[in-house]
Every structure is written in C-alpha cells, then in structure tokens.
Image: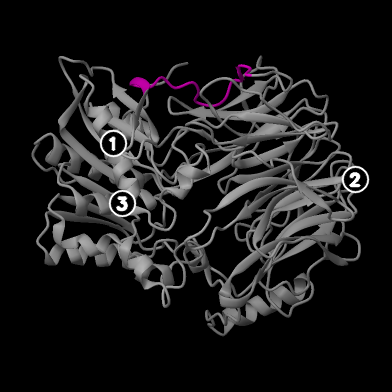
Amino acid sequence: MVRSWYELSDYVTLKRVGGLRLSPDGRRLVAPVSGIKPDGTSFGASLWEIDPEGRAEPRRITRSAEGESAPAFLPDGSLLFASKRPDAESEDGGGAPALWLLPADGGEARRVASRPGGIGSVAVARDAGTVVFTSDTLPGTSGAEEDELARKARKDAGVTAILHESFPVRYWDHDLGPGEPRLFSAAPPEGPAGGLGEPADLTPAPGKALLEADVTVSPDGATAVATWTTTGPAARMRTRLQALDTATGRARVLAEDPERDFGAPAFSPDGRSVAALLSYDGEPGGEPRDTTLWVLDAETGQGRDVLAGSELWPREHAWSPDSSALYFVADENGRRPVFRLDLDTSRLTRVTGDDGAYSALQPDPGGAALYALRDSWDEPPTPVRLDPAAGDGAPVRLPAPDLPLTVPGRLTEVETEADDGTRIRSWLVLPEEASAGSPAPLVLWIHGGPYMSFNGWSWRWNPWLLAARGYAVLLPDPALSTGYGQDMLRRAWGTWGPRTFADLMAAVDAAVARDDVDGSRTAAMGGSFGGYMANWIAGHTDRFKAVVTHASLWDLGAFSGTTDMPPAWTAEFGDPDTSPERYRAASPHRSADSVRTPVLVIHGDKDYRVPIGEGLRLWWDLMRREVDAKFLYFPTENHWILTPGNITVWYETVFAFLDHHVLGKEWKRPERL
C-alpha cells in the first residue's frame, strides 16, 4: 500500500529498516526496524522477519516496550538479540541490556546472559556457535559479582566522578567511563532452556582499547579478532587487529601499521583469512585520508591491499560463501554500488547497475543470492535480493514495513564545471509543480562529513519534506566528497572553505540556470561540515535570502581542542600551536563582520563532536553584530536530533524560517516553542 507521509505527524511515525541478518541456512532474513514508541516521545526498535523469496509480508517477531537490537543467528537457527526488557521469571531488567534468545521454531524469548554493565556488540562463530560479546566493566574488578558490588559502592557513596588516565574522555554524545569495554566469550546454549556457558573474560585490563571495537569470530570459535586502539605520542590514536584465543584469552597482534588504522575485520568462511578496512588519516599539507580493503592470513598476519591501484573507497564488505571473493560497497559518482572482487584474479565487477546506495550485505550461504539494503534519494532503505554473479544487475525488492513510499516530486541530476575545470555533480529534488511557468524556490543542502557523498536517503534531513512544500532542493557533491577519486579530496584538503565554496556556487549557478528553478529565491543550509560551509557562505556572499546552520563549526582553532576527537583535526590541519595559520585561514568566524544574511542557528547541548560552545559563540557573534538571527537550542539532543517531538519542531522551525525569508511570508513561531 502506498502511503502519504509528507506531513510531519505522519513522517515521524514511519517504520525504518535499519539492517539485515541472514540465518545460516539462508532461509530467514531478520531486520531491526525502528518506530515510534507508544508514548510518542521516543523511538525504539523491534525485530522483523523479511521473506527472502519476497512472497510473504514482513512479520514482527519481537515485542517489548524497551525494544530489541543487535540480532545474531546461532548455527541452529535460533536468534540472539540485545534488550533491556525485564525477565519474565525473575521480573528484573529494564536497566542494562541483556542477551536474549528466540528459538528457531518460535515461542517465547528467554534471557541467556547478562552483565552488570550490560551487553554491547555480539559476534557468533558460524560453525561452532561460540558467542563473543562486549560488556562495560569497572577497572580492577573480576567477575560479575565484584563488578556489581563496585557499581553499588559508587552509587551508595554518591560518586559520579571519573578519573581518566588516557585519551579520549567522551564520544559523540556520551561520557566515557568509569567502566571499560571488555571482551567475553561463552559457549552456545545447551538444550531448549539453557543459557550461555560461563563467560570467560578475554581482556581483563584493556583500558580504552576496545572503545567502539569491531569483532569477528573464526568459524570454529577458537579465535576472536578485534580492533584494538592505542594512544601514542601527541595523543595520536592507532587501531590494530588483535587476535585472542577464546578459551584462554591469549592475545597476539595480528596486524598493525604505524601510519594506518584497521577496522571492520571479518573472517572468511573457511577460517583462513581476515578481511578488514585499512584507513589512512592523511597528513597536514600532504596526502588526504584514504581507505582501502586489506586481506591477511589469519595465522601469520601477512596481508595485501586487494584494491591496490583503485581509488574506490570501500565502506563495508562481506565474504562470498566459498571464500574466493569479497563483496563490498563504495561511493561512486553519486551512487554506492555493490562490487565483487575475485581474489585470485583481482577481477573487479560491479554487481549493481542502478542508481542505488547499498549497505548491510548478506551473502546467501549457497551462493545463489546476495541480500542487501538499497536506498536512494527517492527510496528509503529497502531489503533487496541481488544476483551475486551479475554484472550491473537489477535488485529485486522484498516486502518490508511501511514500504514503498511515493515521493512528492521528481529527482534529477545537475552537472557543471567548477572554475578549475573539475566536474561537479548534484542531485536535484524538484516539487511536482515546478515548471517554467512556476519555477520553484531553491534550497542548497550541503552534506556533512565532509568525506562522504550525497548518494542516499536521509531520515534526519529529508529533502522531500521541503519538496512537498514547494521547494526545490539541491544536493551537491563538492570538493572533499568521496566517489570521485582522491583528487577531489586533494582540492580542499586542509583548507576546506574557499575551494568547497567555489564548487557549491558553481552547482547553484547550474541549478538556477534551469527554467523550473527560481534563482531569485534561494537559501543555503547544512549540518556538521555542511553547517561549517553554511557559516562560510554567510560570511562570503549575500546571494541567499536565508542560511540555516546545524551543529556547525565556527571557530576552528577553538573547536579543535574541545571536540571529542582532536587527533582527527591535527591529522589534517596540523598542530594548532605550531600551525595556527591553517586553522585561521579555514575558520568561518574570521568573516563574521561580513554576515548580512538572516541565520538560523541550531545546536544540541549533548553534541560532543561539535560542542555547544561553537553554537553559543556563533550566536553571540551574530547578536553583537545585529544580524537577523534565531537560535534553536536542544538541551537534551546531540549531534543529531533523535526524538519525535524535537524532530517535529526542528522541521517546523526550519520551514517557518525559510518561508519567512525566502517566500516573504509572515514569521510564525512553532506552537510548542
């Protein structure tokens, strides 16, 4: 059934497919699906079964007020997942996430493992069923009981302080500590009512090495490979691959590089190899960051770059069932296709031939199909079945909750040349009524990152909600965008503003040259790096009637020391003490005196990537210069606005601001603000 969803009250209630997991026999496909909770004030996820053949309608298989996440199949087809739901027998729960098991033949889920600090990521050995999971554990404790007593002692004493002895101290939207993530391994459940075996602590004193760790387990369950992060001189962080014996915890370094980071390890089905992403941070004044695909021997660690000579930037990968090939997705020309790399011949084949952006690759164990999520600017993430042997094949869509959606307009592309001759391409969303006789006002929408591409659907910033209100939306890929080769990054590496600004203006010039776009009524907006560029635009041109800047960087020098990840900025711009000129040259705040355009500033207090100080300083600088500005402040939100009520007022405020300044309508303050 096609559903109308353009009103905000409908938009926030849409179900959103967030991932895929295929059972070992290839017969069941499970997806976490988020949706609004009954109280209407937050989102939660439940697990749904998707028919791999596409014949049956999707079926919800878990229900709880707390929601479920992190599905993982055991070899017998039973399904593990994490949830804060209370246990029916003991009536406790609702605090830290525990691990639950849903039998392969259905029935009630039961709790099979819990820890005082909760259970995080979960990995399962394909053949043996050994379960490896992360759990937050207080330093110096041994065993769940001791950890629980230490937590109670802190609580009873009213202690909330955290003593840090290493970097970092917070991440995105949460403080780190006092606990540390550790890895545990356990045998799979025995019998219809059994729990996991007694967990073995594989990493008794990891410090912060396992923050945001990726973990894979060998098919026989004997070895876990995890990303292991260390902090070196000048707080420079490096991530290696650590192999751990799941029975003894004996550890060895499988792979490390003093200049690069390993991520997303995955054992091959035959257990002989591990594939991983290998990333380079770049260097100030030198080569920009890069990512490639690395395959190494699971015993010796000897490896090779299997994408040597290619400028594709892999985002995720999965092994073929016979271990002879890797499937991966990479940004390319405003799309994110699926590729197949045959390891013996190095032959690279593009599996998908459409305009989609693919993710969540799940190869069928028999080799007959490849399942994935497909999205694009005119389609939300949708489960699909692909032919893994195809070249430029077409996806077969599978029924999923609240899909398909019909968009209120049309999608096209715009191409132009920047002043240096570089090709700049953009997606252009047009409202249904846009024509030569009725040209649409234009909103320039700038992506974040900046090392990404505007190639797929966004739930957070959805251009169709503007199109339904009569706006055209331009979605460009300027300098620093991925999918166009490393030269696209080199053009603005370590300088950001001027080159990217010129590309964006060239894209806007091409869009407003169309007879169905009104170049006299335009606005610019963006979030994160896109907000940085919105600020840059406000200080370097008055061609736009309004600027909306969300979670934006304003004073680059001050920001670089207060963000949660300062090393990322020193890798590109250098040491702010010895190279302050790089930060000054790239900082939008230096052009504050030139801002004449009305500005809507939006920021969340829990944003640790771009701290609230950036929004407060920007707001103050605009106020003391008497710029026509407003500040939409979210005390409980972070880099993203994630709750239904706040999402609604975010859009309502943006719509009202644009309508007032671009369309000349009377300013109307959103009712709940």
* Disc 2 element: loop
Disc 3 designates what residue? 498
**Residue stretch rendered in magenta on the structure:** 392-412
- Residue found 71% across the figure and 61% down from its top: 257
The crowding category of the residue bearing disc 1, from other C-alpha atoms within 10 Å (few below 14, some 14 to 19, many at least 20), is many
| CA–CA distance in space, label 2 to label 3 | 55 Å
| CA–CA distance in space, label 1 to label 2 | 57 Å
Disc 2 designates what residue? 128
- Residue found 44% across the figure and 54% down from its top: 493
Disc 1 designates what residue? 506
| CA–CA distance in space, label 1 to label 3 | 12 Å
* Disc 3 element: helix
| Amino acid at circle 3 | Pro
- Residue found 66% across the figure and 23% down from its top: 351
Can you name the residue that lies furthest to the front here? Answer: 420
- Residue found 55% across the figure and 80% down from its top: 162
Task: Give above or below for 130 relative to 326.
Answer: below
| Residue 223 on image: x %, y % | 87, 55
The answer to which of 418 and 148 lies nearer the viewer is 418
Is the stretch drawn in magenta largely helix, strand or loop? loop
Total number of numbered labels?
3
* Disc 1 element: helix
- Relative to 601, is 406 on the left or the right? right
Mark 1–mark 2 contact, CB under 8 Å?
A: no
